[in-house]
Structure formats: structure tokens, C-alpha cells
């Protein structure tokens, strides 16, 4: 099933699933910052390992790097590709922005309030009305 064939509920469900993992949200940020250029899985893995270990890119090596690289290749990148957020070339181990990269980046940037609105399946205007009542 392609993204265009999915119904609205399925699209939201797929996007929610894709945004659940911190590593996938970092991939989205990295890829969205360079939308016109392919990025190697190695580079993305190094950035994530550096973030997780709180070290510089040069120090992001060894077992932490390998764990991230394997998780990206086996789980996270295929999940993001299925959601049409990225284009993942397994053979060349490169990633490019997919059709939904900007939607995903916006959802990551807006964070939990947007996810809550989508999960509750209510419109933005209803959410704003509820917020104004609370305030």
C-alpha cells in the first residue's frame, strides 16, 4: 500500500508510529535539515550515538555507534520509509527526504500537544476552545 492509497486514519496511525521512537525523531530532524542531499546511514548513526552518549561526533564510535547503526538499518529507517517520511536505499545505505518529511518535522517540532490532539481525534478549533476554557 502506498501513502496515497491510505485513508486518513491509517496515515495518522502510521505517522504516530513513526514518531514514537526518539531515534526516529532525530533521523527526521537530520534529514529535514538537508532535504536535497543524500545522507549516509553512518553519518546519522554517528549523530545519534553522539547525542545518546553526550559526546562529540568524533567520539561516537565503538559499541554505542554499532548498536545505533544496526537499529537504524533493521528497524527505524524501514519504519520511516514505510511512512513516506524518508527514502531509504538499503543497498547504498543512504537516506533522503521523503514526501512527508516536512509534516513529520512539524509534528516533531510541535511535540506532545499536537500528538495529543491527533490521538484524541479532535479538531484544532475544539482543542483551542478547550484550552481557552481551562485558562
Image (cartoon, grey):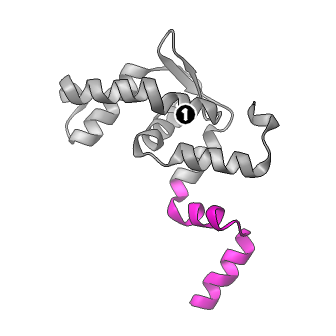
Tell me the element at label 1: helix
Q: Position of residue 36 (x, y in %)?
A: 59, 24
Q: Position of residue 113 (x, y in %)?
A: 55, 66
Residue nearest the viewer, comparing 50 with 81: 81
Based on the displayed image, in which of its 4 quarters is residue 18 positioned? top right
Residue 61 appears in view: no
Please count the marks in the image: 1
Residue nearest the viewer, comparing 52 with 1: 1
Is 69 placed left or right of 78 in the picture?
A: left
Is 67 placed left or right of 8 in the picture?
A: left
Question: Where does the N terminus fall, quadrant-wise?
Answer: top right
Residue 28 on the magenta segment:
no
Based on the displayed image, in which of its 4 quarters is residue 84 positioned? top right
Q: Residue at x 51, y 32 (%)?
A: 31
Magenta stretch: dominant secondary structure: helix
Residue 37 appears in view: yes
Which portion, as a residue range, is magenta? 109-135
Q: Position of residue 77 (x, y in %)?
A: 50, 29
Q: Which residue is mark 1?
A: 79
Circle 1 packing at 10 Å, graded few (<14), some (14-19), many (20+), is many
Is 101 placed left or right of 8 in the picture?
A: left
Question: Where does the C terminus fall, quadrant-wise?
Answer: bottom right
Residue furthest top in the image: 91
Residue nearest the viewer, comparing 30 with 120: 120
Q: Residue at x 65, y 83 (%)?
A: 130
Q: Residue at x 47, y 15 (%)?
A: 93
- Vertical comparison of 111 with 74: above or below: below
Q: Residue at x 63, y 42 (%)?
A: 102
Q: Position of residue 101 (x, y in %)?
A: 61, 38
Amino acid at each position: 500500500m502506498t501513502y496515497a492509497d491510505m485513508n486518513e486514519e491509517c496515515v495518522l496511525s502510521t505517522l504516530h508510529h513513526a514518531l514514537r521512537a526518539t531515534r526516529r525523531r532525530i533521523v527526521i530532524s537530520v534529514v529535514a535539515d538537508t532535504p536535497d542531499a543524500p545522507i549516509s546511514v553512518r553519518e546519522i548513526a554517528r549523530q545519534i550515538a553522539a547525542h545518546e552518549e553526550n559526546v562529540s561526533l568524533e567520539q561516537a564510535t565503538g559499541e554505542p555507534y554499532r548498536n545505533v547503526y544496526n537499529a537504524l538499518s533493521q528497524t527505524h529507517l524501514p519504519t520511516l520509509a514505510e511512512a513516506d517520511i524518508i527514502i531509504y536505499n538499503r543497498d547504498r545505505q543512504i537516506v533522503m527526504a521523503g514526501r512527508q518529511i516536512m509534516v513529520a518535522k512539524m509534528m516533531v517540532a510541535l511535540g506532545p500537544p499536537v500528538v495529543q490532539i491527533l490521538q484524541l481525534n479532535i479538531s484544532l478549533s475544539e482543542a483551542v476552545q478547550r484550552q481557552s476554557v481551562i485558562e
